[in-house]
Amino acid sequence: MTNRMAWALALPLASTVLVPANAQGPAADLCEQDRYLHTASPDWRDQIIYFLMLDRFEDGDQSNNDQGLNEYDPADSHKYSGGDIKGVIDRLDYIEGLGATAVWTTPPVANQWWSEEAKFSGYHGYWARDFTKVDEHYGTIQDFKNLSCALHKREMYHVMDIVVNHTGDFFDYDKSAITHDPVTGFRATNPGSPTNAPEGFPFNLNDPRRSEDRDAGAYNWTGELYNYHDRNRELTEQLANLDDIDTTKPAVREAFKQIYGDWITNTGVDAFRVDTVKYVEPQFFEDFIYADNGILKRAQSTGRDDFLLFGEVKENAPMFSLAGESKMILYYGLPTRPLFPSLISFPLQEEMIRVLGQGQPTSAMTYRLNALMLINPDPNLAVNFVDNHDVPRFLSQGNLPAFKQSMALMFSLPGIPVVYQGNAQAFEEPRRAMFAGGNGTSESQFNTNSEMYRFIQKMAKIRKDHPALRRGGLTVLAHNAMSPGVFAFRRDEGAQSVFVILNTSEKRTLLAGMPTGLKRTGGLEPLFGTQSAPTLSADGSLTLELDPRAILMFAASKESGIRNAQSAIGASEIALESSLPDAALTDPFQLFGQFDGPDKELLLIVDGDLDYARSVPVGKDGKWTVTLGVEDVGTHDHIAQLYAPESSIVGPQIAYTTQRDGADWSFAFADPANDDTGLTGNFRAPTDPSFEGQFDILGADVSHGGDILEMKLSMRETTAQWHPSNGFDHVSITTFFDLPSEKGLDFSDEINAPMPEGFEWSAMHTVFGWGNSMTRAPDQKIGGAPEVFADLANDTITLSFSARALGLASWEGVRLYVTTFDREGEGGFRNTTPEGGPMAFRGDPDGPKIMDDLVIAIP
């Protein structure tokens, strides 16, 4: 018996018992009369969390799948699929074998089963109808206790997902009703699903037409939230029509402390993930967490002295902006008055998508990590993730090598890594079931020999074997300020240092004179990506030619030591003798200089790209000359560097800007208004008033010059009502490219539609509010996603494409086919039914996913 378990036996038994929601007969007692129910808190910095959706992970008890209200249908992604708590217990070997040490499940509480308004079920767990019970589809309270105990027996931990901001959708307000009277415009929604109202005081008091309910004030009597920039409305209005709880009320606060304290005491959970935190005032959490009857005190009464709470504060985080972190700071509190010890790193996740999946400059990652280290009370407690149930999968926007890089980053950066179900099987759909017969899955997806399962195992082992990756500081050593390419950093803890080096480009790139801070003797020992130890230069710097999508990890050998002084990039024998003008280059500019090394030829590398390097002959007198070109339309910053490949000598960085005003070609294309009714004219937009013409293309202004193609789409309407990260919502734009001299496809499985006559696509771009990706036919994701700019005032969406990203020398002869439809926030297409609905298209469910289209031909 471990000391921890012996200690747990001395705890008093719980004094209250949660009521099982749907006992199907007595469940097996894996807790052995609560012997394994409670355990001491771990050091959370050392943990690896596996996150799963109860309904979509494994079906361990088929008897609870169908509760008889037409809410269960594995073929329908909007309905219950059959996963449950027993299924999780059955698959703990799979989770533990991956390297995870904790399991986080979506909320187990009893949910609203079906929303007729949204045509959606509460299978996900976030539409509570009773915060004290387990949902009938998931099992019983005993099952949930058993999960805790089964984990504790393995010296693993149980993280419960909780909600305090809202219940399910039991009432709404007519959007035309503008009044402070809670009765005016009120209407009850979704009766009998399976109850007409939430259960349990005070949440059952949800009808303002009754004076008792109004006096209790458990809810903010409001309609749907649209204005995310108004802080008061963000805190009080309904998120996605879910009934907003008034968390300022003492009765509500006391109820939640009692309810969730009971879950700790009675089911043995070790941590809480808190949903939708930013929609709740910080003062609530100060009371909820730190009050004398708050969560920490309840946890301490069970022997958990470091009960972890980490919150969801999802705020858009544009590149080189602290907008996301600014909202997070509100919920970290102050050193003298703390709130959450940890928050989920949404800004970092967005940056990984942009930098690794979409091909943005790696300097954006440096910016984001500097922010992470600055705002987090303990950066090593930040909760990091790549995928979850609410965002498009990485692999829907990036390729497998890029996905591996994202996992390598997550396991090696400061913070607690979270592996989401399906990551180890390379899923592209965010809520696909893991079990055979579940939604989207015909065969079991628990393959422990899959490529990604083995990769994640390796990352987990490296992390566990190196405390510097779990508890160390962070120093960024190299990045590319202009494009994808090098990103390198070092983690230090005591005498241990680990180096991580990535090439985020699909092309070879140069790591040029990276300062390691090490002595030359001893050097680096390989951990991943190579069997060879690289050679450091005399000053301890490192120069390497990196393969596309390389991942290299090294540990500093014991003999290396750490230098106090950092080496400078560019301490070389390649001299630059010409001077660049201060202004942007509008014409080609000649550089010249001297090289006294052995190489007869240098390479001019622009923005780190070795595959596009230009040869620079070196004369017998050591002199060299090269011209910087000005080809691309617009204003662009670059960094050039001369490199002697034989002797691994690099010259100084040459920063310059090019500016070209005139395009090689431009044209304005027109499209009729009000023709957004599908290819057959039989499709109609969802009936919710927020859909008001966003699918309708009115025209496109298209121009190209050098590498750049700019397409400005004029739309009948543009909106950003749901706070989308790309600046617009209510429309998905899919653009197909017919490339000269390439044999393409005349049909798209993605949108289930034929191409126009004579059109064959070789590449495809997809952009919507929360996604931006490039694909090579038929389904190979590539980097090089375009920059996106939405001008809501003028109803335009501008996309800037790169010819080089598509392997083109120019844009001449290229044709584009632009289509519109809509996707949900997780990335799947919005539902289509024959009758339509507030959030569903009306039309043929099997028809093409096109509302409007436009063909563009470039001569």
Image (tube, rainbow, N blue to C red):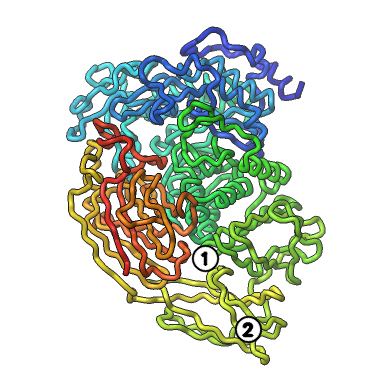
Identified at 50% across, 46% down, the residue is: 395
Looking at numbered disc 1 in the image, what kind of residue is underneath it?
Ala
Looking at numbered disc 2 in the image, what kind of residue is underneath it?
Ala
Picture coordinates of residue 38 (x, y %)?
A: 64, 21
**Which residue is the extreme one toward the top?**
25
**Which residue is the extreme one toward the bottom?**
621
Q: Residues within 10 Å of mark 2 (few under 14, many from 20)?
A: some
The reply to whether residue 236 is in sight is: no
Relative to 337, is 221 on the left or the right? left
Write down the quadrant of residue 202 in the picture: top left
Identify whether 404 is placed above or below 743: above
Between residues 526 and 317, which one lies in front from this camera angle? Answer: 526
Quadrant containing the N terminus in the rendered view: top right
Which sits earlier in the primary sequence, circle 2 or circle 1?
1
Picture coordinates of residue 462 (x, y %)?
A: 70, 45
Quadrant containing the C terminus in the rendered view: bottom left
Query: On residue 575, which mark appears?
Result: 2
Between residues 46 and 342, which one lies in front from this camera angle? Answer: 46
Picture coordinates of residue 81 (x, y %)?
A: 45, 25
Q: Residues within 10 Å of mark 1 (few under 14, many from 20)?
A: many
Identified at 50% across, 64% down, the residue is: 483
Identify whether 46 is placed above or below 360: above
The reply to whether residue 416 is in sight is: yes
In the picture of the structure, the residue carrying the numbered disc 1 is 481
Identified at 52% across, 65% down, the residue is: 481
